[in-house]
Amino acid sequence: MNEIIFECKNLSKSYGLKPALKNINFNLKRGKIVGLLGPNGSGKTTLIKIANELLTPTSGEILIDGKNPGVDTKKIVSYLPDCISLPDWMNIRELITFYKGFYENFKEDKAYEMTKNLGIDVEAKLKTLSKGNKEKVQLILTMSRKADLYLLDEPMGGVDPATRDYILNTIIANYNENSTVVISTHLIADVEKVLDEVIFINNGEVVLQKTVDDIRSNNGMSVDALFREVFKC
Amino acid sequence: MKWNFDNERAIYSQIVEQIKLFIISGYYEKGSKLPSVRDLAEEAKVNPNTMQKALAELERQGLIYSNRTTGNFITDDENLIKNVKKEFADDKIREFISYMKNLGYDKQDTVKLLENYETGGNENE
Amino acid sequence: MLGKLLKYEFKASGRILLPIYLAVFIMGILSSLFMKVPAGGLENLNVLRFLSVLFMVLYIVLIMVAVILSCFIAILRFKKNLFDCEGYLMNTLPVKSSENIVSKLIVAVVYQILGMVVAMISGILSYLIYFGTKGIDFKQIINSFKMVFQELQGLTWVYSVEVVVLGILCFIAVNLMIYAAISIGHSANARKVLKSVGAYIGLYFISQIINYTLVKIFFAIFKNMLHDLESSNLIAIPYLTGIIILEALYCVGYFVLTDYFLKKKLNLQ
């Protein structure tokens, strides 16, 4: 088990001629909750997709627990995509069984507990749920895995503030020193207190990687305020 | 008791301050067991590592002590708690005096004002 | 993991296809029954005529729908499940890309063949219900089989097996060629569907050129043996075997291509 769970080495990606990531280098240790922060189109999603082998880098590489993305890393990475990726003809119980079948680290009890807490009917077909509830189901399934690395792409985009709190609590309660949670978001004020460190990404480049406490004590302002300053339009 | 954070200072130092307040106000009784780091983090909605860092700082200052197997406990050293209380009070007074100075009152005027101060109808303390 | 993928795939396609197959079966029986019911009065006759024609038309339409849908769903499953939003789930499961392909392929071929078998059985059943067994001359059928057996000099089994194998291989190859085209088209940054169609046309032309060349070569070699029946019988089996090998090679080629593009060129934006 590597102490560094996630590493980008000279990572670049372009779509045709349009660069999305430009020579990105950083690494993340285990046991951290990290904010991947940047405006829309800054390259956050591209980065997370490469880590999940949904995109191939143009050059450079990503290492997860020392390995390139592949079957082995997918076993230890729990990914929340930025769209609903679940087959909508299944009901929630079937989806839970599906996850349990494919992921050894999936905790069924936890999934049922969370559906109960969030008021999701497990017998309902996914397609009958509202968009917000679909997102909740996806989040429940993602967080019910005991993974080494969680890659959450905009986990709080479409949900109400109460659910946002529940999500943050789940992330805190889920915390252990072996796993790292990466939260990509632009809703910084909501997550700031939960984060150990933040990575600012803009136009495909890492502008800053710092701990939240460092930003507050050195810059005398919240991460949210710093973000607004750095990404001023 | 509620956890409140401002946006300027490091979160861990704010946690240290809050727990100190909890202790001197008696919300956390002396000698009692603290909730687990995870529970505290969840309650305050902060990062567990940050909470851990704050507890370590409190331990360094002697306000809490940890037992490897049973968790963290509040100190039962009353003098220590009294000192912290005094520190908090001194801080507030310093702040107050300097504020009054800005208003044009010297120390004597301020003391006089304080002595003559009567709790109004809508004041609580 | 392949087993789990198969189970999921069978369910995903089956929930649409199985009810249709069942409907084909029932409609076949119904339409032949209605044709058979003797007409009472004149009015009844008209209603019955109408119903029997309606059921017959429905039956034929259903068969066509079943066959078309079994192919359409195979394509749709592959595209939707691996390259649209669901691809975010399926491509991040801890399974090899080859397992994803194989599971989809097996399920597609099984349902396509099942569809044909259902149509055939229901056709025979309808025939039997309507005409009964009277009109069938079993003796003649057996005789014609015997003739074939004699003609082929005991090689019937080899032929039968080869024809069945070739049939299945053709199904596999057709599906895999579409898979390959979709995977290639979706590695592009834009106009993915259009490029998939383009890739399909490209693959089709390449395969036609290869086929044409090989057939030319084959007949050039065995030119002299094609004139009399006896010797053409002799080359029939090697010819069939050759086609099977060729078809198998196509399957391998398309599979490798699909797997490569799914694993190394996946481009889910």
Image (cartoon, coloured by chain):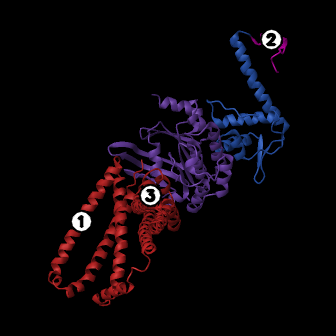
Q: Is residue A136 above or below residue C176?
A: above
Q: Where, quadrant-wise, is the N terminus of chain A in this rendering? A: bottom right
Q: Nearer the viewer, residue A190 or C191?
A: C191
Q: CA distance from mark 1 to mark 2?
A: 103 Å
For badge 3, the amino acid type reads Arg
Q: CA distance from mark 1 to mark 3?
A: 27 Å
Reading the image, the residue beneath label 3 is: C77
Q: Residue at x 50, y 45 (%)?
A: A82
Reading the image, the residue beneath label 2 is: B113
For badge 2, the amino acid type reads Leu
**Number of the label disc, if any, that sits on residue C208:** 1
Identify the colour of chain A in the image.
Answer: purple
The single residue placed furthest to the front in the displayed view is C41
Chain appearing in blue on the rendered image: B
Residue C236 picture location, percent across and down: 25, 82
Magenta residues span: B106-125
CB-based contact (under 8 Å), mark 1 and mark 2:
no
Q: Report in which chain the residue with disc 2 lies.
A: B
Q: Report in which chain the residue with disc 3 lies.
A: C
- Mark 2, residues whose alpha carbon is within 10 Å: few (<14), some, or many (≥20)? few
- Mark 1, residues whose alpha carbon is within 10 Å: few (<14), some, or many (≥20)? few
Q: Is residue A216 above or below residue C178?
A: above
Residue C167 picture location, percent across and down: 35, 73
